[in-house]
Structures are given as structure tokens and as C-alpha cells.
Image: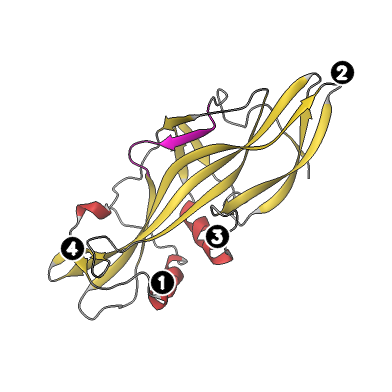
Amino acid sequence: MLQWLTDWYPGTASPSSHASYKVTGGNIVKQTLTRPRSMSPWAIIEVYCDLHFLGYDWVLEWSQQNETDSDVIREVDVPIGVMTAANRIEEKDALLASLDLKDLGLVVGGEHKHFSATETGAITTEKRSVTVKAHSNTFHYQKRYNFLSRLWPFVYAEGKLWVAAVPGTTGPNTADTPFSVMADQFLALPDMLEGEAKVTTVEAAKVWRLGNYPLRPGPPDLSDERIMTEVTQLRAMGYSAPPC
């Protein structure tokens, strides 16, 4: 089905003036909790998933100069959905990304964004029609939201709360998955966007923060395929973090 693009994407009060926007300040916009079965004989272990919103880009898809006296209608294919930095994402990762984004009400610079089912699914291609006015230039952009999904083990052992550390190091044992959402939001502008700016977001309420707890070397090791398989299965059940 064809849809007509307006000059500005829906919900925007004014056009963007930069090509890229990076989040400044707190950026954990959602936190979920898996409840693994026993993976350690000496500790109670839970795995948190922090969804970090990194910012967004206006991706230049194409440009066209129309020097004729008539408007030109251009039909284009646009990608919509979840992808990695390599412009692809495995089905299992797409499932987890969609869980991260499910029911997420993202606030960006005071504006609200709710992702559609199409935007949070695997990449699909849809057709759009764009009008290039007579005697004009058109730069066509698509909005890309950038996220980082971070898993980290939270351990209760010896009467204390710990964060599992990578064995032999002083770093936390995390598993990071960067991904992006090619949104169903577009700009058609007469000039090219350039440069970078800052933007703020609203963090999730009552977030458990990895850096607030001491590190302890030991299990679980998130590089272990068996453990990650179990964590993935439990994440798919959609557990949510309780209030602190």
C-alpha cells in the first residue's frame, strides 16, 4: 500500500536542524528482570536487562533535483523495523529487541514516541510516494533510533548484594547488544542536514544501577552459551523488574 509523505513526520512541531542527536544525561529508559532457575549452588542470581536510549539520526536515503516545470512523484522502498549496525539482525535478537521495546513510551526532548508493531519487528520493506516540487531540491531522510540492550547478573550471596565480575578482571560481566529502529518517520527537506546536537530523555522510574553495587568475580559468566540460552528463554517470558 502506498502512503504519501508530508514535509514533516507526524507529531513534530518543528523541523530538525541537525543530522544526529545524542542523549545527554541518564538514558536507561526501561529495565526488565529475568528470574533464572538455579545456576549456582551458593547464590541467588537474577539477570537485569537495561535498555539504553543512545539518541537518533536522520539517515539520508536519497536526494533529487527537479529542474522541470512540473512536480515529480517518486515511488521509493523504505526499510522499517529493527536492525543491528550491520543492517541486519538475527530473528532471535529481533524477538528480544521487540520485547525491550514493547510498551515503551519514549520521551525525546519533551516529545513522546510509541513504537508500532511494524517498527519493533524484523526489517520489512514498504513503499512510499514522495513529491519533488518543480524547480526544487529534495533531500529525503528517515529517522533511526539507536539503543543498547545490556544484560548484567545481580547476585545475592553471603548476605550481600553483588554484581558478577568477569573472572580475572575488575569489570562487570555484561552482554551488550546494540540495535537500531528504522522508524516510520520521514523528512523531505530542501537542504541537507549536518552536524550533531544533544537531546534529553526521561529515564525509567526506580532503576537498579549496575554501578551502585560491589563487584564479585564468579558465576554466572554471560559468555557461557548454556547460561545465555537459558537467560534468553526466560527473557522471552517477559518478566518485569519489581519496584525498588
Range of the magenta residues? 18-27
For badge 3, the amino acid type reads: Ala
Q: Secondary structure at mark 1?
A: helix
Quarter where residue 19 is shown:
top right
Tag nearer the camera, 1 or 4: 1
Residue to which mark 2 is pinned = 69
Pick whichever of labels 1 and 2 is earlier in the sequence: 2
Q: Report whether 150 appears left or right of 213.
A: right
Pick whichever of labels 3 and 1 is earlier in the sequence: 3
Residue 244 visible:
no
- How packed mark 3 is, by other alpha carbons closer than 10 Å (few <14, some 14-19, many 20 or more), is many
Residue 94, which numbered label?
3
Residue to which mark 4 is pinned = 161
- How packed mark 1 is, by other alpha carbons closer than 10 Å (few <14, some 14-19, many 20 or more), is some
Residue 153 visible:
yes
Percent from the top left, x then y, of residue 148? 43, 51
Residue to which mark 1 is pinned = 228
Circles 3, 4 touching at the beta carbon (< 8 Å): no
Percent from the top left, x then y, of residue 173? 30, 64
Pick whichever of labels 1 and 4 is earlier in the sequence: 4
Residue 47 versus residue 179 in the image, above or below: below
Circles 4, 2 touching at the beta carbon (< 8 Å): no
